Amino acid sequence: MWVDPNLNDFYSRVSRIEKSHAKGYGFEAKGTLGRKSTARGGSRVWRIVKPLTLAVVLGLGLKGVIHYYVGAQTYESRVSALAAGAGFDPVGAWLMYADPVTLAVSSQLQSVLPR
């Protein structure tokens, strides 16, 4: 049976690569965008700012939805009761204060979903 010597060379190289990958090594050609590239992850600041921005936007949206569903009077009375509390309650009242963004989200929901 005829065996191509290049095929043996190919399988030996594949074996070496698989062993290296098992040890945790990686292969990247010079000049290509790979896993170590800065274009993929961005700067360290953006890695922190993006999730924080998402959390703030989601928090404001959630506050607006709560304000819409419970109503303005009930929302304000609950926030003032929270502000009069002890411990971390005033911090919660500060976070749940009906700011202009919360009121805007609530009014948009009211125009889209009238009661």
Image: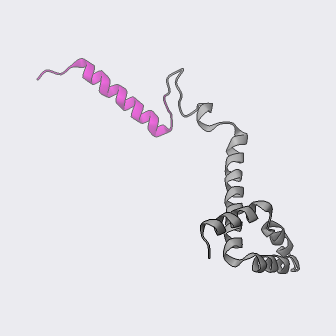
Q: How many marks?
A: 0
Which sits in the foreground, 60 or 20?
60
At x 45%, y 36%, the residue is: 21
Identified at 50% across, 27% down, the residue is 28
**Residue 45 occupies quadrant:** top right
Q: Quadrant of residue 38?
A: top right
Q: Is residue 24 magenta?
A: yes
Vertically, is 6 above or below 89? above
Q: Position of residue 72 (x, y in %)?
A: 76, 75
**Frontmost residue, 115 versus 96:** 115
Query: Which residue is painted at 72% across and 61% down in the image?
Result: 60
Viewer-side residue, 31 vs 9: 31
Residue 9 position (above or below residue 41): above
Please give left or right for residue 109 compared with residue 77 in the image: left
Magenta-drawn segment:
1-27
Q: Overall secondary structure of the magenta stretch?
A: helix
